[in-house]
Amino acid sequence: MHILGNIIWLVFGGFFTAIGYIWGGLVMMLTIIGIPFGFQLIKIGVLCLWPFGSTFGINNELPGCLSLLLNLIWLGVAGFWLALTHFIFGVLLSLTIIGLPWGAQHFKLAGFAISPFGRSVRIDS
């Protein structure tokens, strides 16, 4: 079921969403200040490529205070709007029974987009 859901996701917009996130991440990496934020956009882009069966969890690569500070900056600059967009698409897709699985993936992406620092993406087979 995960493979079929991911293929339908990719065909109906997931591929272009992922390309947009990855492209935005690469553009952010043109400046030194934007490098950590660009990595987070690329992480979200990877999650957009294969959301069914993918999970995210706590990653201990950054200390808690640094992760919190970067998440606050992220939230003020882009995170709120990214999460709001995924939330709105999640609500719209959840209006029909057929769209519920894809709405759930948008809710998952909204949760990741609100605070990506200190989290890692794990793609299950």
Image: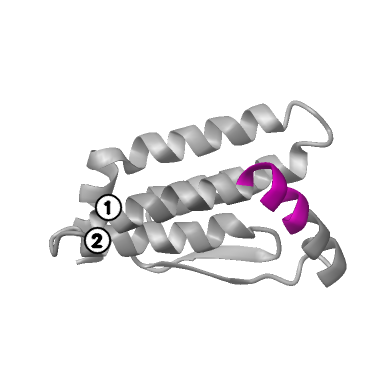
Q: Which residue is mark 2?
A: 94
**Residue 19 horizontal side relative to residue 61, left or right:** left
Badge 1 amino acid: Leu
From where the camera sits, is residue 67 visible?
Answer: yes
Q: Residue at x 34, y 43 (%)?
A: 14
Q: Which secondary structure is most common in the magenta stretch?
A: helix
The magenta segment: 71-78
Quadrant of the rendered structure where residue 62 is? bottom right
Badge 2 amino acid: Ser
Q: Residue at x 68, y 52 (%)?
A: 75
Gap in Å between the C-alphas at discs 1 and 2? 5 Å
Magenta stretch containing residue 18, yes or no? no
Magenta stretch containing residue 76, yes or no? yes
**In this rendering, is residue 106 above or below 78?**
below
Question: Dot 2 surroundings within 10 Å: few (below 14), some, or many (20 or more)?
Answer: some
| Image quadrant where one finds the N terminus | bottom left
Q: Residue at x 54, y 60 (%)?
A: 112
Q: Which residue is mark 1?
A: 92
Quadrant of the rendered structure where residue 101 is? bottom left
Along the viewing direction, whichever of 2 and 101 lies nearer the viewer: 101
Contact between marks 1 and 2 (CB within 8 A): the answer is yes
Relative image position of residue 19 (x, y in whole percent): 45, 34
Q: Secondary structure at mark 2?
A: loop
| Image quadrant where one finds the C terminus | bottom left
**Residue 51 horizontal side relative to residue 114, left or right:** left
Relative image position of residue 90 (x, y in whole percent): 34, 56
Q: Residue at x 24, y 41 (%)?
A: 12
**Residue 34 horizontal side relative to residue 12, left or right:** right
Q: Which disc, if any, is residue 117?
A: none
**Residue 111 horizontal side relative to residue 7, left or right:** right
